[in-house]
Image: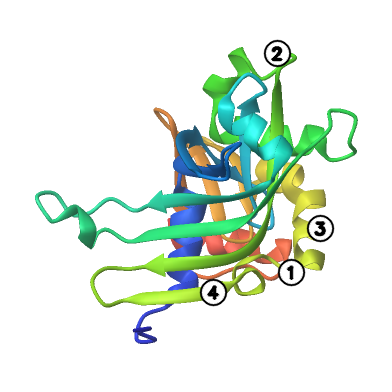
Amino acid sequence: MDDDRFDAQDMVRRIVRSAATASLGTLATDGGPFVTFVTVATDINGAPLVLLSGLAAHTRHLARDGRASLLMQAPASEGADPLTGARVTVSGTFQCVAREAADHARLLGRFLARHPEAEDYAGFGDFSIHRMSMEGVHLVAGFGRISRLSASEFLVPAAVAKAFASAETALLDNLNGTGPRLVAVDPDGVDVADKGVRRLSFPRRAGDPDEVKSLWVDLG
């Protein structure tokens, strides 16, 4: 049963944007399910990004059939039943982004901002960025709290995402000061490099880059 007494959209945004890893489900050659473990980031609009080796089985699966799902989970409270932790299944189709594509450098930059350790191998010829075209989201926020969202209910509108993509470098320059270094920003929050990379979510989604400074101040 769906339960609308909680903010499903906000919870999905926080889980997907904060996730550094996910379980990736692909379709094997025989059509059966195949699940593996990957690192994940998000594009400005919220679409999942993964950096995959062409030598991996799941990458070969996606080259044949791009349909896939990602399971991301917020940790349960210490000592609690693991099933009480909120989790999100994102479904859609992955496309490999060609190195000569206009947005390849930006997408790779988004991924490396979240996973700087991947810089050691991101330039290898067999690694490539894949971006998901989302179809839907299934949220389980604990026992009896289930919600299903369409892609449009999660993704940042195209015009807003375009504005943020153009403004991201300037926003980071303006926000960075003497504290931990901000490495990425989007309408839902910022990624901060501080003994690793962690996510700080805005209290609400920004509709314009000009709103970011006040939302950042609210986080302080």
Disc 2 to disc 4, how far (Cα)? 36 Å
Local crowd size for mark 4, using a 10 Å CA cut-off: few (<14), some (14–19), many (≥20) = some
Earlier sequence position, callout 2 versus callout 3: 2
**Pointer 1 or 2: first along the chain:** 2
Q: Horizontal and vertical percent for residue 120? A: 60, 13
From the viewer's perspective, is 172 left or right of 139?
right
Are there few (<14), some (14-19), or many (20+) residues within 10 Å of tag 2? Answer: few
Which badge, 1 or 4, is on the more N-terminal residue?
4
The Cα atoms of the two marked residues, 1 and 3, are separated by 9 Å
Mark 3 residue element: helix
Query: Mark 4 is on which residue type?
Result: Leu
Distance, label 1 to label 2, CA atoms, is 33 Å
Q: Which residue is mark 3?
A: 162
At which x and y percent is residue 84?
21, 62
Q: Which mark is residue 132?
A: none
| Circle on res. 157 | 1
Gap between marks 2 and 3 measured at Cα: 29 Å
| Residue at image location 46% in from the left, 35% down from the top | 36
Q: Which mark is residue 124?
A: 2
Q: Look at label 2 and name its amino acid.
A: Phe
